[in-house]
Image: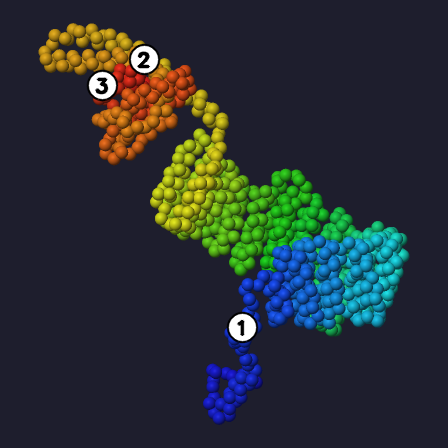
Amino acid sequence: MRPVIFSKMDFSHSSLFGYIEDLQELTIIERPVRRSLKTPEEIERLTVDEELSDIERAVYLLSSGQDIQGTSVVANLPVLMRQNPAETLRRVLPKIREVLHVAGVEMQLTAAVSFLTVLQEESVSIHTYSHSFLHIILQNLEHRDAGVSNAWLETLLAVIEALPKETVRHEILNPLVSKAQLSQTLQSRLVSCKIMGKVANKIEAHIVKREVLPLVKALCQDVEYEVRTCMCRQLEHVARGIGTELTKTMVLPELVELARDEGSSVRLAAFETLVNLLDMFDADDRSQTVLPLVKSFCEKSFKTDESILVSLSFHLGKLCNGLYGIFTPEQHLRFLEFYKKLSTLGLQQENGHNDNQLHLQTLEQEKKYISVRKNCAYNFPAMIVFVDPKNFHLELYSIFFCLCHDPEVPVRYTMAISFFEVAKLLNSDVYTIHKELVTLLQDESLEVLDALVGHLPEILELMTNGGENNGSESKLLSIPDLIPALTTAEQRAATSLKWRTHEKLLQKYACLPHIIPSDQIYYRFLHRMLTIILTNNVLPVQKAAARTLCVYLRYNRKQEQRHEVIQKLIEQLGQGKSYWNRLRFLDTCEFIMELFSKSFFCKYFFLPVLELTHDPVANVRMKLCCLLPKVKSTLKIPTDKHLLQQLELCIRKLLCQEKDKDVLTIVKRTVLELDRMEISVDAEQLEKEKQKNEGRSTNINDKIFEKKRRDSKTSSVLSKSVNLSISGSSSGTLAGKEEKKSKLVRSQSFSTQVLHPKYSNIDKCPNKSSATGYTSSVPGIGKSCMLSFSDDSFRTHSVGNSGNAAFPSSSSRNLFNSADQKNNGNKESQSRKMSIWYLIERVEWEKVKKKQKIKFLAHLTEKSGNQRLEEATFWWNKVGAADGTL
């Protein structure tokens, strides 16, 4: 079909006719699109009565439903077994057995999976399972479709693991004898081979020898190479089942014969089985039987049998170490040279070592050679053990260099994965591979970098400590190019689309404070982390950078640098213009609470975090509310009492002012969580404050006693002067009365030093509306200050503009007396509940002038009696003596 080009259309007769032909061809190749809607007949056939139970519906669909409905029932079999196993086994499973005889591939595969699921979920006992399900599995093993047969075989092998030995012997092994005969189909014999390997590990060794080994021998000599290959790979399981002695006499000869088989796949299977069974052969078998076979494989692999080359390179490390004890020095060197040859296979032409090669390598050969070099990289740690780490630089360093600089990414990727193992084996000689570490860090492939970063902290620790725990005194001295390599790797990961590699790299860079000096961290990495937080668009990457930055800050001991970073975090993140940056600030604070002390967070970040309660973006406030329980957990009482007050104030503002319903919901939930939390107490600081308060109380009492003594002398002098001035004028008489009244009040205030016992339980008085009120004209008493009694103190209540301060009435005092009779002598209660003290403190009596004091005390005398006056006067003088304001 000619392509239709619309850019230069020719509308001549011939060209137009050609276009019509093209359109006709397109019409022919189009396939009709089936309508998605069902016809009424199809809907009728697919409709099931809704009143049927699950079991009845399953039986109905299996009996008269369509294939897709039957497949759905089979897929739902594990659910039915969980719900009603007895009815499912009685009614549903027989129907499934009937349907599977004529079922298609899809239902067969579904049934194999469902049967396996029922076994794994243990919906029924293993005895019931073998009685009900095992025969169905065995019947479908020889399905004509290879995929279906393999699916049922996998189910059967799993069932064999769980079956009792007797059941395996009678239900599986006995029928297996006939299925393994040469007269059976190829598929039947292949299935028998795999069952042999599983059964050999399940039953006793003498039964295996008598009933299984004859079948194994017959299958190893089968006319079809597929059967011989399959049975050869099962010989390892058979050998494990029968033990060392029978393996030496019965299995090893078969392996030797299969190793010389004409089929390359059979020889490959024999070689791999020999390598896997090395631990079961004694030294004589290894030296006399296995070693000659291995040498033969190695010689033929380059000359006549390249098919075994990939497998040989993969198992070479295990093979060399398994035969290490029987190698002569010459054989040891030969195998080492063979490994070196494999490590550079396919690179000779590029390096100019094989210029006379006449034929170019095919693409298939090139892939094979890449696989061989990749396997050599995989086996490199094993080869270090083979040559001894002390001989690494002399024997293997050149190969290590070539593999790390291999032109193919899979080879370098494998070297990056095994780099940590190599570093551990070299120990004190790890310095010899510093350059290769830098090379892999700067590799152009991010896959290589990702593989290396997995164990980067451990590798760097080995590098800087020389493979020993010698401390960190030699930081950076041995790897001068490390910092540029690390920064290059991070920048290359940042500019790629593989953000997971970038995230992983930033997480691993948290180890650098143990490797690199603090100044280098500060100038080369710390600010880079802050830039990533501010500019990167991937959230996991930003969080990884934030946590690593906090680690760097944690190990930075220079206060100037610390304060600079903290200031940038607060200004650029916490107070940033972008709400995204403010969210990242909260993430950073969470990491700080994890890595730093509680006092550090409270000192630098507590208040900036609380400022975000006023953030205009609801998401920020929402995230802050979720963080508040952790924030509160950093507080200690009494040290952080003022911060706790700020936290409570912010919560109250959120509860009162929040308009977003989602945020308000989280706020309410957070309040409940905060209420359940207990704040840690700083016992040492609490003891200091207690001692300080006790000392202050002693000083106050001393001052009160001294003031009382001075006032006593002053009152006696005043009384004499008042008597001399009685004969004055009427205005003088009025002044004399005021002076006398003042003297009377003051003298009465000295008559008592403690509260009367009847006020010791003043907190137990109920707050009644009949209490006598006093309207204060004293500055400092607010208009809405209504003081009432509570359990521990007087508390203010807003009463509009009445401006009344409520005092207990005489009836209230009767209650006090009755309560006092029960609690007389409770000194602790007296000291805790001095309600008058709180009354005076709340209305700021220290501002009251002496003239206003007289008016107040005179009014109080009229309303409450002399005893009440004495109490108020005492506490008045106590406050004045303590504060020095009166």
Residue topped by disc 1: 43
In this orientation, which residue lies closer to the viewer: 276 or 491? Answer: 276
Residue type (three-letter) at the residue carrying disc 2:
Thr
Q: Is residue 422 above or below residue 43?
A: above
Q: Are marks 1 and 3 in contact (CB under 8 Å)?
A: no
Q: Residue at the spot x=67%, y=50% of the render?
A: 420
Nearest to N terminus: mark 2 or mark 1? 1
Q: Is residue 707 above or below residue 457?
A: above
Whole-number angstrom distance, CA of label 2 to CA of label 1: 102 Å
| 34 with respect to 351 (left or right) | left
Q: Residue at the spot x=47%, y=24% of the render?
A: 687
Residue type (three-letter) at the residue carrying disc 3:
Glu
**Which of label 3 and label 2 is nearer to you?**
3
Q: Position of residue 299 (x, y in %)?
A: 82, 64
| 572 with respect to 116 (left or right) | left
In this orientation, which residue lies closer to the viewer: 340 or 314? Answer: 314
Query: Which quadrant holds the C terminus?
Result: top left
Residue topped by disc 3: 862
Residue type (three-letter) at the residue carrying disc 1:
Ile
| Quarter of the view holding residue 832 | top left
| 714 with respect to 414 (left or right) | left
Q: Residues within 10 Å of mark 1 (few under 14, many from 20)?
A: few
Residue topped by disc 2: 752
The numbered mark at residue 140 is: none
